[in-house]
Image (cartoon, helix red, strand yellow):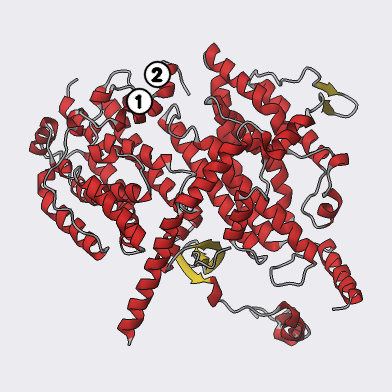
Amino acid sequence: MSNKKNWPLWEIFVRSKNGLEHRHFGSLHAADAEMALENARDVYTRRNEGVSIWVVESKHITASNPEHNGELFEPAQDKVYRHPTFYDLPDEVKHM
Amino acid sequence: MKNENLYNYILGIADNSLILGQRMGELCGHGPSLETDIACTNISLDLFGQVRSYFQYAAKIAGDKRTEDDIAMLRKEREYKNVLLVEQPNTNFAYSIGRQFLFDVYHLAFLTELQKSSDLTLSAIANKCVKEVSYHERFSSDWVKRLGDGTEESNQKMQEAINDLWTYTDELFHQTPADIAMVTEGVGVDVTKLKEKYYKQVSELLQEANLEVPESKWFQKGGKEGIHTEHLGYLLSDLQYMQRTYPNMEW
Amino acid sequence: MSEEQIRSLEKQFDERIARDEKIEPKDWMPEKYRHTHIRQMSQHAHSEVVGMLPEGNWITRAPSLRRKVALLAKIQDEAGHGLYLYSATETLGVTREELYDQLHSGKAKYSSIFNYPTLTWADMGAIGWLVDGAAIINQVPLCNTSYGPYARAMIRVCKEESFHQRQGYEIMMKLANGTPEQKDMAQDALNRWWWPSLMMLGPTDDKSVHTEQSMKWKLKRKTNDELRQQFIDQTVPQADLIGLTIPDPDLKWNEERQSYDFGAINWDEFWQVVKGHGPCNKERMKARVNAWEEGEWVRDAAMAYAEKKQERKQKQAV
């Protein structure tokens, strides 16, 4: 492969309708942000799937390492007191 | 036909979209990148959608047995009224983009005015199309800038395309008798009034794109009267192939 | 890592998949898993993109405006599907350019069916009905495959593809109900596309090299022969319904199996096409290589422009 510069990869986030969050839809290639937006419009919203698009160049995303999943996420598993079901209340109590 | 001027006027508008849509459709599967391929197909689809609205309306006005497809595919070459610009071939991507850009700037200005037509069907069609064409114009302008102000090679290619296509721009502002009649009735758009703004806008963008505005004052015309370049015949033989080979059938 | 450690990781990995857990790009995975996925996913992407060509032949000649927009939209979807699948493959650490390189150099394969020519308008119907029909049978189970990005791409592909087969069958139906000439055209297309469509579901199980491993990784849920039977059983009644005849004299309903028995497939032809000697292998590859090479100056220009714009922005900021 030559060392020439190819169009970088972008991650595409689309808001399906107002009131919903932007959701990751997929990725595509584009030379710059404007083109990424235009391409995203044609690639990911052809069927009326969106009202707003975010594009982020993939290299700018920092991801957690799955090898650290143990230390990152497992400690949260036994913190049941963060959930309402941890607390015992009589059935008569309403609206809580 | 009772309303022949209106019929001809609609054909004049629709044929531009038909022939340009056909040209853009040729690129499908052959674009410089998958993303660009999808974008060009979208433009083609928009244009064919517009064509169908126009021809369905024209068929209603004609009031005989003709359908949208008969009107689109069963006329003779001399009966097509599109401007010469839109029938020019996809010599390379610069030509495709240049053709699209030079037409889009006109098309958007035209549709913006057509929205005010006293003919409610036409103004409704224009209203829908103007959004699509705003996007086309942005897309093609962006690409003219990328190619014009990209590499030395792309600059050269884009300049060559603009130089070659320039000769077909003046015709956009010619009026046929049907045009004049429709303007008088408040139905049509007076294209002569769009000319100055068109050249200003196009020139500004070309300059921004590091391209020279051609100085030539020699222009080609004839498409609106059905006198086309040699390219159209080949395009039509594809477009009409099925309807001609298997007449009077439904598909 | 010692071999023992790797074996233990592989065991855990297989267990995760068996539990129906998904594998995501940054997770540890056996090299073989990565390679197999790059191969299968890119092959799938290539098939979508090369598959645009035989149908693309008919865009300019579609018989009506309605058919023209439907065909254009369908082919555009195929470009989209190629794009989703290339993107999913890229999560495994390979670039799209590398994948194209493999395709253009002949190293990577794509579905052989696209090496057959589209000679008449009815071929658009036959491709939608049969080729997309066979593809759907292959693809639906992949929505549950173990590799997350692939499964997600396939969910999108399957959702969008639901109109493709209907589009094709509608074309065939219209022809079959049309003039005798149109009906002949439809029958001729069915005759030419039937056997290649059956071959599209892959070599028979005893000749298929990847099946067992692919089953474990959920790249496959059923064997090629099972899929082929499913395709035949669902397609034959569809042909009957519109009065077309499946070109197989040995085709017969088997009451005991509750399935159709069918005639022998010409696997010599299959391998000939796979090995590059089908009617259109050269044309298809030439078209792809041309598009890529002729597009190079365009892609370079866009990149150069993006960099200039960035520089100007930075200068302004200073």
- Which label is found at residue B188? none
Q: Nearer the viewer, residue C117 or C283?
A: C283
Q: State which chain disc 1 sits on.
A: B
Instruction: Give the quarter of the image for residue B170.
Output: top left
The residue under the point 12% across, 39% down is B174
- SS under mark 1: helix
| Figure check: C240 above or below C70 | above
| Figure check: C29 above or below B154 | below
- SS under mark 2: helix
Whether residue A90 is visible = no
The reply to whether callout 1 and callout 2 are in contact (CB within 8 Å) is: yes
Q: Going by the picture, which residue comes out furthest to the top?
A: C180
- Residue under label 1: B73
Task: Give, as a three-letter code, the residue at label 1.
Answer: Met
The residue under the point 34% across, 62% down is B152
Instruction: Residue B18: give x, y in percent of width and height.
Output: 33, 36
Q: State which chain disc 2 sits on.
A: B
- Residue under label 2: B244
Q: Earlier in the sequence, mark 1 or mark 2?
A: 1
Instruction: Residue B34: give x, y in percent of width and height.
Output: 50, 52
| Figure check: B180 above or below A42 | above
The residue under the point 65% across, 60% down is C89
Task: Give, as a three-letter code, the residue at label 2.
Answer: Arg
> How far is disc 1 from disc 2 in space, using C-alphas?
8 Å
Q: Nearer the viewer, residue C138 or B228?
A: B228
Instruction: Residue B177: give x, y in percent of width and height.
Output: 10, 31
Q: Is residue C173 left or right of residue B226?
A: right
Label 1 Cα crowd, 10 Å radius (few <14 / some 14-19 / many 20+):
many
Q: Quadrant of the N terminus of chain C?
A: bottom right
Q: Quadrant of the C terminus of chain C?
A: bottom left
